[in-house]
Image (tube, rainbow, N blue to C red):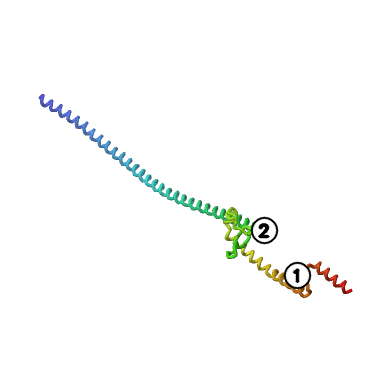
Amino acid sequence: METQSALVETRSEVSAQQVQIDRLVKKQGEIHIKALSVIAEKKAEFDSLRTRVREMKQEVVELSSEAEAERTQVTVLRAQVQAEGARVEAAKARYQALALGLRLFESHQIGWESLRPDEPRQLVWVQAGRKPTPLPKIVDDRLAPAKSLLELIIELICQILEALFASRELAVVQDVAIIQQARVELGLEPDMTIENVLVRRSGEVGSTL
């Protein structure tokens, strides 16, 4: 009887422990399911974040490309502005040099002559009563931006002036020749002036009377 009673008691304890074990197993199952749900939720969030990070990286790459393109465009525009500024400055320097050269030519400070008989004409420094000399370095430097154009213009001006005055010089030469011929026909000495001629003429008339 004692053994049976102990056996019954043991079975009761085993049953109670089994119920408790079943309850724990069930609870662990619920916790496991809940954990899987949380893990799945977190994994979905992680996947979403990873997708977003990937999209952000792509956006960063695109923005970097756009920024690089903008920088390239800015560099090109800056170079164009600098080049345009350099062209403007060069044109300004050329205009100033040309204006200076024409003023010096007009005031007979520079001329278009040969320094030696066997040399071609060039821009030379001209001083009253002195032979032409090479341009002073300071003048040559200031005329340098437009020197080739200035030489062309001054050479053209000299050619035009020479062509205009050639006919007048020929007329003067012809007039001198006529006067010399008249002197010979009248028997006048080469160095006689008009006053001498008149005195001589009045003397001839007086002797006739």
Which residue is label 1 attached to?
190
Query: Relative to the observer, which residue lies in front, 72 or 206?
Result: 206
Specify the quadrant of the image occupied by residue 199. Answer: bottom right
Q: Is 178 displayed left or right of 153 in the figure?
A: right
Q: Residue furthest right?
A: 209
In this rendered view, identify the residue nearer to me: 200 or 67: 200
Residue type for callout 1: Pro
Residue 174 rendering spot, x and y as whole percentages: 72, 72
The residue at which mark 2 appears reads as: 129
Side (left or right) of 76 relative to 5? right
Badge 1: residue crowd in 10 Å (few <14, some 14–19, many ≥20): few
- Decide: few, some or many residues near mark 2? Use Cα within 10 Å; few <14, some 14-19, many ≥20: few
Residue for point 25% across, 35% down: 28
Q: Measuring from the top left, give residue 141's x and y in whole percent.
A: 57, 54
- Residue at x 13%, y 28% (from the top left corner): 7
In primary-sequence order, the first of circles 1 and 2 is 2
Disc 1 versus disc 2: distance between alpha carbons?
29 Å
Q: Quadrant of residue 98?
A: bottom right
Give the label on residue 176, or none.
Answer: none
Dots 1 and 2: beta carbons under 8 Å? no
Residue 192 in view: yes
Judge whether 25 appears above or below 64 on screen. above
Task: State which quarter of the image contains the N terminus.
Answer: top left
Where, quadrant-wise, is the C terminus in this rendering?
Answer: bottom right
Q: Quadrant of residue 26?
A: top left
> What count of labels does the image hold?
2
